[in-house]
Amino acid sequence: METRKVAVVAAGTSQKWGIFPGTYRDLVAEAGKAVFDSCPALSGGDIEGFIASSVMPERNVFQSHVAPLAAETLGVRPTKLFQRVENMCGSGTVAIRNAYTAIACGLADVIMVVGAEKMHTPEWGETVLNMLVGVDREWEGAVGVTAPVQFALTAQMHMRRFGTTVEQLAAVSAKNHRHALGNPYAQFPKACTIDEVRASKPVAAPFTIFDCSSITDGAAAVVLVCEERAREFTDQPIYLLGTGQAASGFNYANVHADWSEWPTLRTAVGSAYRMAGVGPGDIDVAEVHDCFSISEVIVTEEMGWAEKGGGGAFAAEGRSTYGGDVVVNPRGGLLGCGHPLGATGVAQATEVFRQLRGEAGPRQVDGAAIGLTHNLSGVAEHHVVIYGREEAL
Amino acid sequence: METRKVAVVAAGTSQKWGIFPGTYRDLVAEAGKAVFDSCPALSGGDIEGFIASSVMPERNVFQSHVAPLAAETLGVRPTKLFQRVENMCGSGTVAIRNAYTAIACGLADVIMVVGAEKMHTPEWGETVLNMLVGVDREWEGAVGVTAPVQFALTAQMHMRRFGTTVEQLAAVSAKNHRHALGNPYAQFPKACTIDEVRASKPVAAPFTIFDCSSITDGAAAVVLVCEERAREFTDQPIYLLGTGQAASGFNYANVHADWSEWPTLRTAVGSAYRMAGVGPGDIDVAEVHDCFSISEVIVTEEMGWAEKGGGGAFAAEGRSTYGGDVVVNPRGGLLGCGHPLGATGVAQATEVFRQLRGEAGPRQVDGAAIGLTHNLSGVAEHHVVIYGREEAL
């Protein structure tokens, strides 16, 4: 079996993330303008496939069928493939994987992926309530076992088992808020100290509000094409080298024997490394899913960058920032940028695209040639993509 | 480029469609049991990928993240691919296409697709209101331009342009309700006359309630595998021979210059015919999206079975039933079975699978070797898959 290589040729995000004053359509339009602006050779008529990623527009904007809405907004009439995907916080990466498989097997040559989420509703209470649809509402959400609680329990297990400290968790938060200073669109650029992180409002022990990503409106878009056509659109295509995904259950009580281990992430990234023909030491830059500070700690371990149990020290010692082993979350991560659910995975790809092209401005990672995105949907569902410059093929 | 062939090896649906008394989980479990029962060689551990198709569980069951919920319910822990797709009424076929592309390009060998929709809520008014999220809520739904209105306007245009009569529309409804008599799980098996269809409650002119598919709870599941592994699971794999999709806009006012023509369906089925290497005359059995009676009329034209404008006569003359040119909707279609949005496309595939294997019992189409499914999501978004027995490869 010989499948086609697939490259990203265009990428962009909506502007300042946070509370977006316009409609869902307006938000899509902003990301759409950015993606077209990034690639002058691309026009709406080139797009054969269109994939929308959005988690709960049914609740937050009373609109489910957002794929044709977004395509119409951007002047795209897909003749070969279209759809919306929802996979909670990891939807954006699922959408990119679907674009990849469709192009790789020949169903379409040029596919646009748009991730958009407008989370703020006129009533804050409604927005918070709506988040319950993303966890096991019947058995967990209804009794308060929401995402902050699940990740807090995960952090407590990690602290007990490996001696991880709250200061190490805070080091992740401080780093990503600092990284966000280089990103004009980030929701929370802050030069905060570890003490300031600890002194912020408590959420679910051991987390303070700075350990938690936020409710955010935002959108991002990328365009993927088959290798044969990549040069029609850009001199610097960025190739998808490998991808993996794995999941284990839904109910937090069932998913793992030990919450401080994420075996499904090992499976997912193992698939991606094998397919890409690279290993942990080859990754120059990574966008990983730091929905809570503990998440980045465990991710850096399961990726093979830190030893198991050493993810806290890895961050505290500066090994995941500029000058370290691998630059993790240069755009500021979910902690610094905010987390507009269905947009996050697409925005991660946008950042890696820019980094590998040397277009990341003040946050550029010198000489970045291979990058990775990691998205999760709850502690047990992981989605990984590895990208590289053309010479890495 | 040489991609792998993909086969369906197992298929099943939940039992009696209509108002389901249990939870969403229970509904998924019922379809899951049916799909495993259909293929004794298959177990949960074989499933590497899992795709859920569901349109508005966020609203009707207050649960968005249904892919892991459904997988957990069925004892599946996917190690290679998982996701939920939403594409309004065509979601099920989108999900099957995603399973196809992932297997064809080698990302996974064995993928289960589960479509499930629980539409009835305790308050009927809420169920009806929720349907507004599927149309352009901001510009059309909010002023009453819902699906029945859009298809009624389509029917009026077709009647004016081609002289199609209400009796011809009623002939579609009478046929599909009659076909449903052979399907013990159909919501509305009825031996009704054309006069009885016309005498039923008016909905939106020219439709009576019998011209319209209904609010329904139901679920269906299929398992797709790569050609190399098909014989591990069954002696009678049914192959996916071709597929196509096309869309044009969202807002009903924008999509087509003339609502009585569906050019995007011609594009979609053209792709599917070319990929499969077959033509209109080769299709023995078809499951098409008769959400309203006019839909089947236009579909039979755009598929190339009836001449343009002749779809009404095609039904009235018996050319779309047993003994005619092509048996359309043998299980009873959406009119006879009900239309549980995200489940419908998967149920259509289940029916074609059974028909091509000669397992359709009282509704068997003699000698059916090539079958087609057609799903739509609004008048301008069409999804087509063509299936065949092994000898058709």
Image (cartoon, coloured by chain):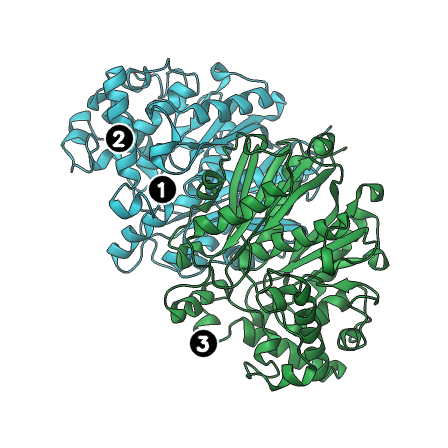
Chain colours: A green, B cyan
Q: Amino acid at mark 1?
A: His
**Is residue A217 at least partly visible in the picture?**
yes
Q: Quadrant of residue A205?
A: bottom right
Q: Which mark is residue B317?
A: none
Q: Which image quarter holds the N terminus of chain A?
A: top right
Residue found at x 45% / y 46%: A66
Q: Which image quarter holds the C terminus of chain A?
A: top right
Asked if A13 appears above or below A362 in the picture, the reply is: above
How far across and how far down the image is residue A224, in percent? Answer: 65, 40
Residue found at x 66% / y 51%: A350
Q: Amino acid at mark 3?
A: Val
Using the image as rendered, state which of residue A283 and residue A253 is in the foreground.
A283
**CB atoms at circles 3 and 2 under 8 Å apart?**
no
Using the image as rendered, state which of residue B74 and residue A268 is in the foreground.
A268
The residue identified by callout 2 is: B153
The residue identified by callout 3 is: A143
Q: For the residue carrying disc 1, how many other residues have a C-alpha within 10 Å: few (<14), some (14-19), or many (20+)? A: many
The residue identified by callout 1 is: B339
Callout 1: helix, strand or loop? loop
Callout 3: helix, strand or loop? helix
Residue found at x 57% / y 32%: A48
Q: Amino acid at mark 2?
A: Leu
Q: Is residue B370 left or right of residue B121?
A: right
State the CA–CA distance, disc 1 to disc 2.
21 Å
Q: Quadrant of residue A319?
A: bottom right
